[in-house]
Amino acid sequence: MHMPNRRKFFNRLVAGTGMALLTGCDKLSNSKWFTEVLSSGESLSKHAHHLIANRKSMAQEFSEKDLSPDFRSNGTALPNNAEYQVMANNAFEDWKLTVGGLVVHAQAFTMADLQALPSRTQITRHDCVEGWSAIGKWTGVPLHEVLSHVKPLKRARYVMFYCADPMAADGTKLYYESIDLDDAYHPQTMLAYQLNDKTLPIKNGAPIRLRVERQLGYKQAKYIMRIELVDTFDHIAGGKGGYWEDSGYEWYAGI
Ligand SMILES: Nc1nc2c(c(=O)[nH]1)N[C@H]1C(S)=C(S)[C@@H](COP(=O)(O)O)O[C@H]1N2
Ligand SMILES: [Mo]
């Protein structure tokens, strides 16, 4: 992944949202608070997003005729992880999703448990900062359904997703991601187990992957093994809340 290309594409994405307009507006850049936002590159995306989109707003949904013929794979296509591959060879019958941390009732969900919960289907566009988009139909369990079973404690602020795929050649640095509770309770945020009416393929993150539709591709964690509610992620991996965030990408990757 090349930083300049990702940045270029990000700017292109942002261009359609009115952010470019805002940054070019003299009145705004003269105001103290706006200059402060601009001077902090990391929070620009989040603050600018707040200016133009309500956190409760829905991502656009599409129709069947808009579906991409093939939803390509990006990043890991098969985790280089023996334990994962054993589970994959057995159709993930032995996979369990533990949801713990700052919750009242930590719980382990089998796929059957997750599929017994209310489901949701949505057709949305995925935008990767590397310069491609695809429209896919996702079916899964809304994350708020899972959270209502485990009951987050009052001081929980983020949901962490730990994935099966090591990103370093020596098998370390597992992919991981995090979102805040606004996004966790958003109606379109789900743990998807189907893509285009079929069992989620391994290349797209089987057995489950996150869909957090108002953010960019790298937030859509694949191969989720464990979920943890936390009040801070300062002490987790590089401390920035996600694998790509640890190497400089925005934590709030609003589209
Ligand atoms: N576990 C894991 N999740 C991941 C990645 C990855 O490499 N590993 N890549 C991210 C990136 S950059 C993108 S664009 C999407 C790609 O999803 P896809 O393979 O279904 O196209 O997954 C995201 N989630
Ligand atoms: Mo991506």
Image (cartoon, rainbow, N blue to C red):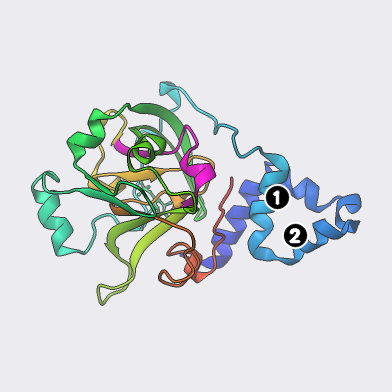
Q: Which mark is residue 37?
A: 2
- Tag 1–tag 2 contact (CB < 8 Å): yes
| Of the pair 152 and 4, the residue shown nearer to us | 152
Which range of residues does the magenta coloring cover? 179-193
Please tell me which residue is depicted at 51% across the width and 43% down the height of the picture. Answer: 183
Along the polypeptide, which appears first: circle 1 or circle 2?
Answer: 2
Relative to 118, is 88 above or below? below
* Distance Cα–Cα, label 1 vs label 2: 8 Å
Q: Is residue 71 left or right of residue 244?
A: left
Please tell me which residue is depicted at 33% across the width and 27% down the height of the picture. Answer: 119
Q: Is residue 120 left or right of residue 180?
A: left
| Of the pair 34 and 64, the residue shown nearer to us | 34
Q: What x and y, as percent, mark residue 174?
A: 32, 66
- Hey, what amino acid is under mark 1? Ala
Relative to 237, is 51 above or below? above
Give the quarter of the figure containing the C terminus: top right
Q: Secondary structure at mark 1?
A: helix
